[in-house]
Image: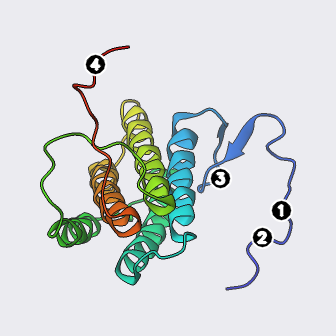
Amino acid sequence: MGNRLSKIYTRTGDDGTTGLGDGTRVSKDDARVAAYGTVDETNSAIGVVLAQAGVPDAIRHCLTEVQHDLFDLGGELCIPGARVITGEHTVRLEIDLDRFNEDLPSLKEFILPGGGPAAAACHVARTVCRRAERDVWTLASSTEVAPEVARYLNRLSDLLFVIARVLARAESGSEVLWRHDRGRR
């Protein structure tokens, strides 16, 4: 594959529009642009998790595959009518989710985001992923979006929550539980 970007700036977006993958120009605040932009943000947030020291190889492999999926998913959103993400992608997430969750204790309380640098970064990635899912639903309210896209993002945020729990235990030995009975100040 040759050079795809020989020049980084084009000046074509200086008027507040951007080009979709099919060549259509839309406003930079278009719901489609917001959706694939937040998917890209999710991918970047996962990159921050992977940049942390001590991330176990199994998690590193899983999240790297997710990054590839998110690049494909963003491409699907960038090209109206494109279909790339399938049920098999979501099933793979569910298999990973079950595998990582298997040794975790059941939660009886909410946990606070944190637990160490990688766990905290994973919680940030989870919340950005939830926003991406909301942005996809906003887009789906005005145009057709394959249902598997939102399903994938929903499952991914669950996976990121479980991975954050695994990382918190690996980094600090435990998770911080929300104390709902601590009294009001």
SS of the residue under disc 3: loop
Task: Report x, y in % for residue 143.
Answer: 40, 36
Label 3 or label 1, whichever comes before in sequence order: 1
Proximity of marks 2 and 1: CB atoms separated by less than 8 Å: yes
> Which amino acid type corresponds to the residue marked 3 in the rendered image?
Gly
Which label number is shown at residue 43?
none
SS of the residue under disc 4: loop
> Which amino acid type corresponds to the residue marked 4 in the rendered image?
Gly
Q: CA distance from mark 2 to mark 1?
A: 6 Å
Q: CA distance from mark 4 to mark 3?
A: 57 Å
Read off the residue under disc 2.
Answer: 5
Q: Nearer the viewer, residue 81 or 100?
A: 100
Which dot, 3 or 2, sits closer to the camera? 2
Read off the residue under disc 3.
Answer: 23
Label 2 or label 4, whichever comes before in sequence order: 2
Which label number is shown at residue 8?
1
Q: CA distance from mark 2 to mark 4?
A: 57 Å
Is residue 79 in view from this perspective?
A: no
Proximity of marks 3 and 2: CB atoms separated by less than 8 Å: no
SS of the residue under disc 2: loop
Assess disc 4: are there few (<14), some (14-19) or many (≥20) residues with their C-alpha within 10 Å of its C-alpha.
few
Label 3 or label 2, whichever comes before in sequence order: 2
Residue furthest top in the image: 185
Quarter of image, res 100: bottom left
Which label number is shown at residue 183?
4
Task: Report x, y in % for residue 166.
Answer: 31, 65
Label 4 or label 1, whichever comes before in sequence order: 1
